Image (cartoon, rainbow, N blue to C red):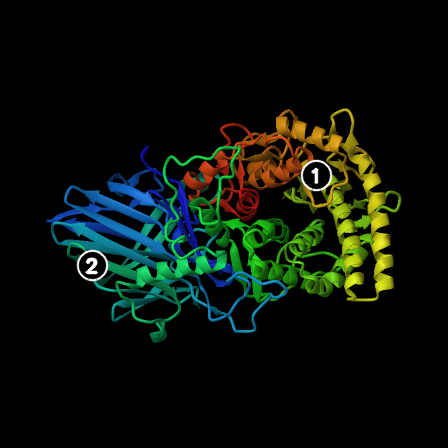
Amino acid sequence: MLDLDTREWLLTNGLGSFASGTVSDVRTRTYHGWLFAATNPPSDRTLLLSHLEASLEVLGSVVALGTNFWGNGQIEPTGYELLRSFDINPVPKWIWSQDNWHLTRQLLMPSGLVGTGDWGLGDKGTRGQGGVSNAPAQFCHRILIQYRYEGSDTAILRLRLLIAERDFHHQQTVSSRLQFSQLLGQQQVCLQAKNSGHFGIPWHLRWTQGIYQTDAVWYWNYGLPEETKRGLGDKEDLYSPGYLVVTLQPGDTVTLEARVGFPDSMAGVLTSETFAEAVEAEQKRLSQIFGWSKGGARDWGLGTGEKFSNTQSPIPNPQSPLNQQLLKASDQFIVYRASIAGPTVIAGYHWFNDWGRDTLIALPGLALVPQRFDLAKGVLRTFGHYCRHGLIPNAFPDVNGEPIYNSIDAALWWIETLGLYLEATQDWEFLAEQFSIVQQIYKAFVGGTHFNIQIDATDGLVSWDAPGVALTWMDVVIGGHPVTPRYGKPVEINALWYSALCWLSQWAERLSQLEYGSPVRLTKQAQRYAQQAQNVKISLQKFWNPHLGYLYDTIEPDDRRNFQIRPNAVLALSLHHCAFSEQQGCQVLDLATVSLLTPYGLRSLDPGDPEYKGRYEGNQEQRDRAYHQGTVWAWLIGPYIRAWQRFYPQRSLPFDWQPLLDHFLFDASLGSISEIFDGDAPHKPRGAIAQAWSVAEVIRHIK
């Protein structure tokens, strides 16, 4: 048990489909399996292929290579005891061995968006161009598996299929209503579930060699210990329609492909070279996106013992292995959404969908730093298109229906990120195209919109007040009651409002000079926005707490001040336009450094606060109550660094990158960064194993 390595790996296909598991090959979560297919990209994720349970027979001796947790607490079989090595680069690879043999397995999930041209997901963008191709989208959800045998004697490899047909959030249980059909063909088997008279997703498994034996049986009561810890359903039943028997000579390989849909002759012949060709194609795709040299993308590994000092940039050049791993990680979050026919960003794996706020905060690191300008432009255009009543969607529907607009800050983050895009590209034609949306947001905030969002006429600050909702990024609601309500005037919202007004003034002036509209009218607008920004700058001093040398977190509707020490003050200092003085900024950073800074990001609340919760654990409600009450958020290290560089440009950053980089390379989800960490040391990683804005903010500042 102590040798079980439950660190995780993740593969994605750009459509929301994914595969995931652990180093020791044991499934510990509902979200572990080899083919979760997002049949309505990036949603409707359904587990089809859980895994192949392998055993190897050599000289009459049979060894089981799998490892399973069972509901009674047992671990059987214990194939992990024969696992000699695991590597994540360039694809997950396991090697099991004994004295006279070793067996290698590799997995690859190829990109699933084919035949569409550039959806903002592919090659680097060019200035002034972007958006969405008019080519029809074609989707392919598949995973490739390859085994290679080395030894002195002939071996027999048995691979038992373990399959399912269930939503990725829930477990499968044996039921008389759930049945599976299989149709055996030439070196392939087609599978489909039928549940209560409804047919499931057809898919098929094919292989390069071997004999398939039908042997339908249910395996009951798999245990999922990570779900036990989270207070969620933790038992799973899997169905096996049969198994594949492969006779292997030393040096032989067998390649398998699980693919959604009925067998298609256009898919090409599966050969022993198919896997290597798919790996090369994936490396080429990433090289084209990120501009790596031909040889630079061949080795994504990082040599053991390679360390980075705090005084030297950990990424000395764009070809460095670490840089490539970070960019490769960033690409896992970029997906195509069918309902909007364009690119979006998965907030995190395994269980999140795309969210407006998260996408816009992550976009500079995911798209602007690596110069994926088409991607940035496509996302900004899509979100702008869905602006309603001055609000930008925080979530899109999976099928017919209206987007969800439960955010006060998504619209302001859209303006902020648009500004960063324009700074990077000088794409003033795009500004002219989007300026009416910018003005729509401005007018809605000034005139008032949903959730009683409006500008207070007395001080020009943004205020809101609506019961039972939480509209800022601290958005947990339990039983209709927000855990961190933040009604009234949140500090970072008003800092975003100030920055937005500065952008508006700047853009109106620019458009007047470029004659994209009436120069006189635009000049007057620029002056009005600038005056309003100046008034807001003065009013933002209401947030200054001279006793703490910090910013109040919120000015409540009855004008009371919330003096909790939260990272929102740091957010307010980190935007492109900042309204606070050098002295105030330094004082805020000094206190935040002492109270909030950890090796993995900023705490969401000062440990000295009576509401502080230092560990994110327990059942759903216990975890939700800790989510923004002390839990460390990795993405907040980005705003902290930007604020530090603004107010302490000559002082070294009081942050050691090494723990966070070690986490990225060697902990939790190998090759990605977790969503959150415990507020208390040793700051155990929690939440989603791979989070878009966590990765994005590291990319943004490690250069």
Q: Give x and y (percent) for residue 420.
A: 66, 52
Q: Residue at x 32, y 49 (%)?
A: 93
Q: Is residue 558 visible?
A: yes
616 is higher (above) or lower (below) than 46: above
Q: Give x and y (percent) for residue 668.
A: 44, 40
Which part of the image, by quadrant, shows the N terminus? top left
Amino acid type, callout 1: Leu
Nearest the eye: 496 or 558 = 496
Find numbered disc 2 in the image and state the secondary structure of the residue it sits on: strand
Q: Give x and y (percent) for residue 222.
A: 35, 46
Nearest the eye: 461 or 696 = 696
Q: Residue at x 12, y 49 (%)?
A: 152
Mark 1 neighbour density, 10 Å: few (under 14) some (14–19) many (20 or more): many
In the rendered structure, find residue 177 and report the number of the disc placed on it: none
Q: Give x and y (percent) for residue 507.
A: 76, 57
Q: Is residue 173 visible?
A: no
Nearest the eye: 689 or 343 = 343
Find numbered disc 1 in the image and state the secondary structure of the residue it sits on: helix
Task: Give the distance between the C-alpha atoms of the residues marked 1 and 2, in whole angstroms.
Answer: 62 Å
- Quadrant of the rendered structure where residue 87 is? top left
- Of circles 1 and 2, the one toward us is 1
702 is higher (above) or lower (below) than 446: above
Amino acid type, callout 2: Val
Mark 2 neighbour density, 10 Å: few (under 14) some (14–19) many (20 or more): some
Decide: marks 1, 2 in contact (CB < 8 A)? no
Give the mark, 1 or 2, whose residue is nearer the N terminus: 2
Q: Is residue 635 left or right of residue 436?
A: left
Farthest residue, direction right? 458
Q: Residue at x 38, y 59 (%)?
A: 176
Q: Is residue 613 left or right of residue 498?
A: left
Q: Which residue is mark 1?
A: 573
Q: Which residue is mark 2?
A: 245
